[in-house]
Amino acid sequence: MTTRRSKNRPLSIGIAGSGFIARAFLMAMDCRDDLLVKRVLTRRDLSSCLEFPRPDLLTNALGRIVDECEVIVECSGDALHATTVVDAALKAGRIVVTMDAEFHVTTGSHFVGRGVMSEAHGDQPGSLAALAEDAVEMGFSPLVYGNRKGYYHPNPPRDQMEFWSKKQGLSLDQVTAATDGTKMQIEQALVANGLGADIIQDGLLGAAAESMREGGAILAEHAKRLGTPIADYVIAPNDSAGVFIVGEHDLRQRPYLE
C-alpha cells in the first residue's frame, strides 16, 4: 500500500542493515526535520544490539519496514539479503535508495523498470554519477570515470587486516575487500554499467602515479586507444581520497571554461 505524504509530515525512512554504514546514516538523520528514520531492519538478535544508537527502532521483520516506511535505504552490504529487501520494497511501491554496489552488479539489473531505485550520492559510484552529470552539462565528453586508492595489496596479511578491522570498527571481509581491490572493482563495474563505459582489462588497470591528475592522464590515453570511455582507478598515495573524471571539450569552449 502506497501512502500520500502530507507536506507537514517528514518522509519516513526505513534502513535495511544495522552495521557501520547504517549507524552512520541513522545518526546523520538527527539533523534533519524533513526525514525521519522510523524502522531499522536487522538480522541480529535484538537483545544483542544494545550498542545500536536507536535500539528501539530495530526489527527482524522485513514486512514491518516495508509497511511503515515510504523510502527504504538498503545498506546491509549483503547482495543476497539486499535482493530480498529490494524485491519486497518495490513490490510495495516504495522508493529504494541503496549503498550497495555488490547488489547492483549481481542481481540489480533484474529490478530495472520495476520502480524507483537509485544508488546513493556519497559512496563512490553515486558521487561519480553526480560528477558526470555536472561535467556533461558543462560540455565535457568523459573519457575516464576514475576512482583512487592510496594503498593496494592484492594479498594482504591476515594479521594486518584483523588489526585494521578492529581499529576501524569494520568486518574483516570489508577491510580486506577495501585493501585487495575487490571493493574498487565492484564499484567501478557498477559505474561502467550505469554510465555506459568499458573496462581496459579484468581487474582494472590501476595506474600508479604521483597524483590523480597524472594517473588520470594515463588512463585517458588508454580510453582514446580503446575508443570508448572507461571506468578505472589510480593508485596515488600522495593525493587525498576522491573520485574524478577526465574529459575532453570542444576547443571553441576553452575561453569560457577558463
Image (cartoon, grey):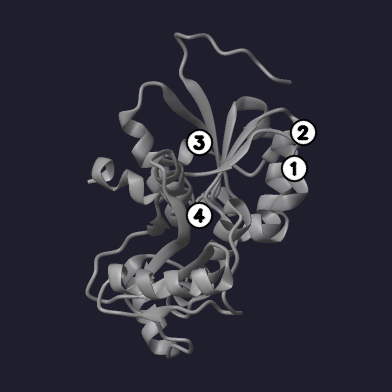
Q: Do the numbered discs 3 and 1 sit on residues whose CB atoms are within 8 Å?
A: no
Q: Dot 4: what SS?
A: helix
Tell me the residue that label 1 is attached to: 87
Q: Nearer the viewer, mark 4 or mark 2?
A: 2
Return the mark for residue 129.
none
Tell me the residue that label 2 is attached to: 91
Q: Do the numbered discs 2 and 1 sit on residues whose CB atoms are within 8 Å?
A: yes
Q: Earlier in the sequence, mark 4 or mark 3?
A: 4
Q: Nearer the viewer, mark 4 or mark 3?
A: 3
Q: Dot 2: what SS?
A: helix
Q: Amino acid at mark 3?
A: Leu
In this view, 63 is above or below 209: above
Q: Earlier in the sequence, mark 2 or mark 3?
A: 3
Q: Is residue 93 left or right of residue 126?
A: right
In this view, 158 is above or below 32: below
Query: Residue visible at 40% across and 79% down?
Result: 207
Tell me the residue that label 4 is attached to: 48
Tell me the residue that label 3 is attached to: 57
